[in-house]
């Protein structure tokens, strides 16, 4: 069985929990080797049931909180003897049967330095600079909006990079760091994030993600996963 980790923003900063509810339903239905679901956050949503709560708080700048909470979760996994876990976002919806333990690594091309970057792109630029300094010349983009398997020990080895940027306004992308430092076998595939007015489609990742303004897509997914999961009271 493979354990699952969700990282949520603190309750005061959290938006709608609608996506998380549907994501958990899709996971229960389609993950063939579903272990324990762990959620790292300050307070669990009041409707949540049958998950393991890893209490952790947003203490850093916005871009660094998820990195920190994942490291905290890895230390919990380490104490429990777990070797790896599947990292999920609350807006990932698993649309077909899959095994978490053998879930492939996906990339959606490579990553280039961007002039006049947005805050999100500044994180990308910072991570490219770091990876280049570590001898990675071509930076693959592991941010294809689908789950990723993390090895506990390997992810914990990234803590030294987090410590350097935890107080900065812009940090590093842990997915880019982990993928480019540790993953050798991957599949290149189109990003599985859907935007407004797009139809539900099958993806090689067996996953669909939504954008914040794609209510029509989320409504279609909700209609597919319309029964409560064991994670709901």
Image: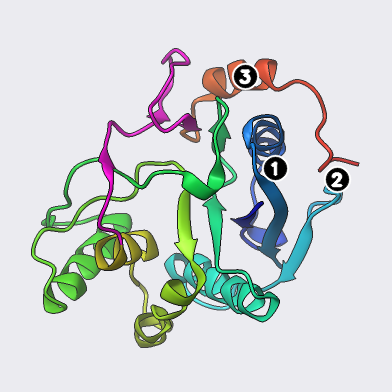
> Is there CB contact under 8 Å for labels 3 and 1?
no
Q: Secondary structure at mark 3?
A: helix
Residue 52, x across and y down, in percent: 78, 61
Residue 229, x across and y down, in percent: 80, 34
Residue found at x 25% / y 62%: 180
**Farthest residue, direction right:** 233
Marked residue nearer the N-terminal end (2 or 3): 2
Q: Is 56 or 96 nearer to us in this picture?
A: 96
Calculate the distance from the C-alpha at mark 3 to the C-alpha at mark 1: 14 Å
Q: Which mark is residue 47?
A: 2
> Is there CB contact under 8 Å for labels 2 and 3?
no
Residue 92, x across and y down, in percent: 54, 38
Q: Which residues are magenta?
A: 183-209
Mark 3 highlights which residue? Answer: 219
Q: Quadrant of residue 96?
A: top right
Marked residue nearer the N-terminal end (1 or 2): 1
Number of residues whose C-alpha sits closer than 10 Å to that of mark 3, classed few (under 14), some (14–19) or many (20 or more): few
> Is there CB contact under 8 Å for labels 1 and 2?
yes
Q: Main secondary structure of the magenta part?
A: loop
Mark 1 highlights which residue? Answer: 17
Residue 116, x across and y down, in percent: 15, 57
Calculate the distance from the C-alpha at mark 1 to the C-alpha at mark 2: 10 Å
């Amino acid at each position: 069985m493979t354990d699952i980790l969700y990282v949520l923003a603190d309750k005061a900063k959290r938006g709608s929990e609608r996506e998380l509810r549907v994501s958990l339903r899709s996971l229960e239905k389609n993950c063939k080797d579903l272990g324990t679901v762990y959620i790292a956050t300050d307070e669990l949503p009041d409707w949540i049931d049958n998950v393991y709560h890893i209490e952790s708080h947003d203490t850093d700048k916005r871009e660094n909180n998820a990195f920190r909470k994942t490291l905290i979760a890895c230390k919990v996994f380490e104490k429990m003897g777990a070797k790896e876990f599947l990292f999920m976002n609350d807006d990932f919806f698993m649309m077909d049967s899959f095994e978490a333990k053998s879930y492939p690594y996906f990339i959606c091309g490579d990553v280039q330095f961007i002039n006049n970057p947005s805050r999100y792109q500044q994180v990308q630029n910072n991570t490219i600079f770091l990876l280049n300094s570590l001898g990675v010349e071509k930076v693959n983009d592991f941010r294809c909006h689908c789950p990723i398997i993390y090895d506990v020990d390997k992810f914990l080895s990234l803590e030294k990079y987090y410590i350097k940027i935890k107080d900065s306004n812009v940090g590093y992308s842990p997915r880019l760091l982990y993928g480019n430092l540790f993953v050798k076998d991957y599949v290149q595939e189109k990003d599985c994030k859907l935007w407004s007015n797009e139809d539900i489609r099958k993806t090689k990742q067996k996953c669909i993600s939504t954008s914040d303004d794609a209510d029509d897509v989320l409504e279609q997914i909700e209609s597919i996963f319309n029964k409560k999961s064991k994670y709901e009271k």
